[in-house]
Amino acid sequence: MFEPRSSSGLLLLAVIALCSTSLGQCQADPVVEIVTVITSSINGTAGSLDFNFNPGTFVSQFASLQILNFSSDGALAGSPATTGDVSGTLPGTLTFDNGTALNDYFEGFTFGTVLKFDVSLYGPALSSPDGTSKSGSSFAFSMFSDPEGATPALTSDLVDGIALSVNVNLDGSTTLTNFSSETIVEAATVPEPGSLAEVLLLFLGMTIVAARGSGRAAERLRSH
């Protein structure tokens, strides 16, 4: 069994452990979309917001979703209505999973000029598709110009009132559909798998080279 005899040996063990952990995390990196909605055309309107994340008609592999970093110059009404597997309250983090048929968060909202939030999708359906599920899952975000959620706002989808949807496909990929000309969606930059581990290994190599150089210098000093 290897027994480290120096600080570089201890560092080696620490970096190997951290690299292993990092690789595991990188393989499950979430899909993150950054959403910005320009709401100045309905500024001051007492309306509502709706977020939902639901499985398909047939068997769907488990997946989760979070709404993060919600911000706006508008005002949330408070006392949201939730259905299914949903936890949290805006402007804090909302967490959904697709464990029940309907998972929904609805809240009254007086619109300002802009609202922003991040959508993070993660779980086995994205990181390790099972190849046997028959349906994916779908996230939808809607805005309404009335507190009851009857009149869609800022969307061309006048049937379902959806402004933005993200589907989780059976192969783990995602498909984004934007029905709102006022909604801007950007994909967040996530680390490539193993990139953190590669940086740590590079650091380890530099540390070992420096340690060997110091050792040789010490030997030369002792020889004089």
Image (cartoon, grey):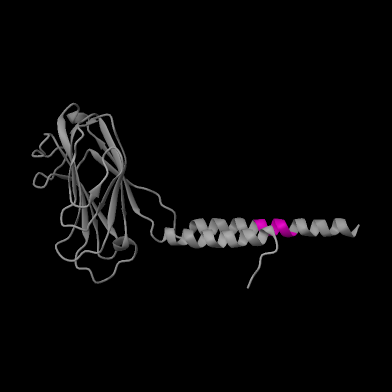
Vertical position of residue 20 compared to residue 115: above or below: below
Q: Position of residue 224 (x, y in %)?
A: 91, 57
Question: Quick one: quadrant of the N terminus?
Answer: bottom right
Instruction: Give the dominant element type of the magenta stretch: helix, strand or loop.
Output: helix
Viewer-proximal residue among 48 and 41: 48
Quick check: is 210 in the magenta stretch? yes
Vertical position of residue 47 compared to residue 14: above or below: above
Residue at the image position 29 percent from the left and 62 percent from the top: 125
Viewer-proximal residue among 192 and 9: 9
Q: How many labels sit on residues? A: 0
Q: Position of residue 135 (x, y in %)?
A: 19, 64
Q: Is residue 58 left or right of residue 129?
A: left
Quick check: is 66 in the magenta stretch? no
Vertical position of residue 139 compared to residue 130: above or below: above
Viewer-proximal residue among 80 and 203: 80
Q: Position of residue 196 (x, y in %)?
A: 50, 56
Residue at the image position 89 percent from the left and 60 percent from the top: 223
Vertical position of residue 73 compared to residue 127: above or below: above
Q: Quadrant of residue 26?
A: bottom left
Specify the segment rendered in magenta: 207-212
- Name the residue furthest right: 224
Residue at the image position 24 percent from the left and 72 percent from the top: 132
